[in-house]
Amino acid sequence: MSEIRGASGGRPPGPTQIVRPYGDTTGDGRIQVSFTLPVPFGTPAEKARAEGAAMQLAGKMGLEPAMVVHAKGMGPDYTFFIVYGRVSHLVDLSQVTVTEREFPLLSSAEVNLRIRSGLGRKLVVVGACIGTDAHTVGIDAILNVKGHSGEKGLEYYREIRVVNLGSQVAVPDLVARSAAEGADAVLVSQVVTQRDAHISNAKEMSAAFRAAAPDPGARGWPLLVVGGPRFDPSIAPELGVDKIFGKGTTPGEVASYLAYALVPNAGRGAEAEVGASA
Amino acid sequence: MQTRLNLDPAVVREARALAAKAGQPIVEMARTHTTVSVERAVLRLAGLQGADADGMPWVNRLVDAVRETTGLEHGVALPAWDALLTGGYENLAALAAAAARGEVAFRIPEDADAAAARAAASAALAAGIGRIDANRAQRQRMIEQTSEPRKPWIYLIVATGDIYEDIPQAQAAAREGADIIAVIRSTGQSLLDYVPEGPTREGFAGTYATQENFRLMRAALDETSRELGRYVRLTNYASGLCMPEIASLAGLERLDMMLNDCMYGIIFRDINPRRTFIDQRFSRQIHARAGIIINTGEDNYLTTADAVDAAHTVIVSQLMNEFFGKEAGLADSQLGLGHAFEISPDVPDSFVLELAHAQLVRELFPDAPLKYMPPTKHMTGNVFAGYLLDAFFNLCGVMTDQSILLIGMMTEGIHTPFLSDRDLALENVRYVRDAAGRLGESFVPAPGGFIEQRARQVLGESVALLRRITDEGLLTAIADGTFGITKRPADGGRGLDGVISRADGYFNPASEILESGERAPAGGLDPRTSPVEAGAAR
């Protein structure tokens, strides 16, 4: 156990940092989980069996020892458990991979300046909810002046022209309108989806843009950006889009990304980004 | 109700007068226009059900066929019943099938033919509205046989997409303590210009509103109401392009509450404003007749706009909903005006501000069964903090005597609630209701204090906004982005092509019955003593 951070504390140097969950003592490995099992919790025999079932699951999850601190019947057929226990698993920090933001966060003034000096015209953003999703709350939170989480939306940026097409826009209409508006970027939001419809909708959208402009990078090929709480930001290449924004994205992050990716003379990284991911 | 906020009655009167002034031109427009959905609702009330092989309802086929030949300026009833009588069709479904094949030559009948068509149509609609009256009486009987739940009513949502999954979930939720079950609709149904048919097992983040789904769920909840000895209400959504038809189906299948906002579809679904206001008036006339409590959607404004800055837009929308609702015949006890607990917990005194807003709404609408919505915008994924926020929401609801509490989920925004999330949420509200139920009677804000000042400020801002709206017109105000920040021009959005200006000889046998106030003998209910008023009275 010498590789485990010891009670002496302090951050060990070097690449092989091994840690365990922290309850109240370094290395104690203590965690808490809650779950429901479809078992009754009525008679004493049922209660004993239910708690045993919870202990079995805890054991298989690597909780050893485990303690069922709360069990409650929910209706005749289900029981809710809260379990504390010690996990034997180790976390190797050297094996942790993170997607770091590849662009700097800019203020609205910096975004405007970058567009004005680098592009020499307004940057055009077309936004829409596609497919059956009628919930415009996501796209509106990014585009509307009002914005979200205290940050103003893209409409607030003087150098960005926003065309918000609203909800349930058909993909062909989105492609046509983007071309008509001379869109530099297309923002698509998917909030309420089922059965991974957000994935298939995004793929359908990127395929339609690819079909309309077969030469990626050519003029008329807008940056494709999708966003929504259920997207995994790491699968942009799989969806054929340039960027995915997940839950909690603020308008400032989107504006900073657009300024970074679409204003080429402000840094070589921008060109590389567009070329690589398109 | 005694005022605890020392609101100036003159200011409250002015607010109501301004709302009426802003709403009156809209009512005039609704009186002089119809829509394809209003006309389809007439056929549904006359009993026309079913769909063609493609799943397109016969009411759509028949209304479309009439529109293509005689137009709808005179309403669908005259040409349809004329064709029914003169063409020898067995019933409306046979007529619709023939019309869809292009075999029916519709006309606007005159003289004796017109009188015959009117009489036949009126008889058919009297039977349909008689069924709505009978359902209203049946609701009252059910409440007498079971019991009326205590306030606040606990409102829970089910939304699996499959009506046969929804039913056991709804029954389980009722057993766990829910007084009201709302079946969330499939995403995007609001933008369908037809109502799907039959029981449905596939939906997107919700279950389609269909007549058969309504019937199945109400029957299941009747069973559960008897089992529990407590009447469990059923809620759905009379919104979107088919608002009048869904309202009619709700009346025909004894739903108890319907989401029905005067502006929600415009602002949040980009449905044409004119279409919405015309559809809304007819649907509210149906709800009034059916004893259905409407739920309005002001909570939505606070999910896009800041809950402190936009507090007055909630009040303005509530006053507009009240005006339009009463004009359409709804009683105070049917006005489930909405609002929400959406102030950022980072704002100093956020809970005190919530108390001020909630108490203001309570005092402005003392006899309305207010619907209070839980926090959603500031639920962060920290389920423990979220559980605390929901408890404060429940406390505010209890202290300010809200009538309907939509139960907040600590996992809001993370996933469709787990069974355990719902159970914990119910435990939360039960604790607050049992522990602090009597706190409301002692909740008297300090005269001249923060709560009173804040309530007065919001009311003042509401009056100022209403003045602006009456000056420029409600449609212009909506186009300017006054509500929910979104700009919605009067000629934009979906469904404007379904709006038709009424001709002089326009005939709508449903509206005639609904506006005459006459009751079919089967219902026999005096609106002043009818069940929902008694039931919903606070």
Image: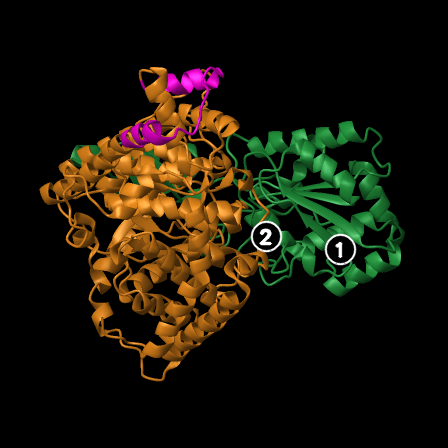
Chain colours: A green, B orange
Magenta-drawn stretch contains B116:
yes
Quadrant for the C terminus of chain A, please.
Answer: top right
Main SS, magenta residues: helix
- Taking A57 as reference, is A228 left or right? right
Q: Residue at x 33, y 26 (%)?
A: B164
- Compare residues B56 and A3 and report the one nearer the observer: B56
The chain under label 1 reads A
Q: Position of residue A10 (x, y in %)?
A: 60, 59
Q: Is residue B143 magenta?
A: no
Q: Amino acid at mark 1?
A: Ile
Q: Nearer the viewer, mark 2 or mark 1?
A: 2
| Chain identifier of the residue bearing label 2 in the image | B
Q: Which residue is mark 1?
A: A160
**Relative depth, front residue between B16 and B230:** B16
Residue bounds of the magenta highlight: B91-119
**Numbered badge on residue B489:** 2
Category of crowding for the residue at label 2, using alpha-carbon neighbours closer than 10 angstroms: few (below 14), some (14–19), many (at least 20)? some
Q: Residue furthest left?
A: B145
Residue at the far right: name it.
A265
Please state if B408 lies on the left or on the right of B229 as rendered: right
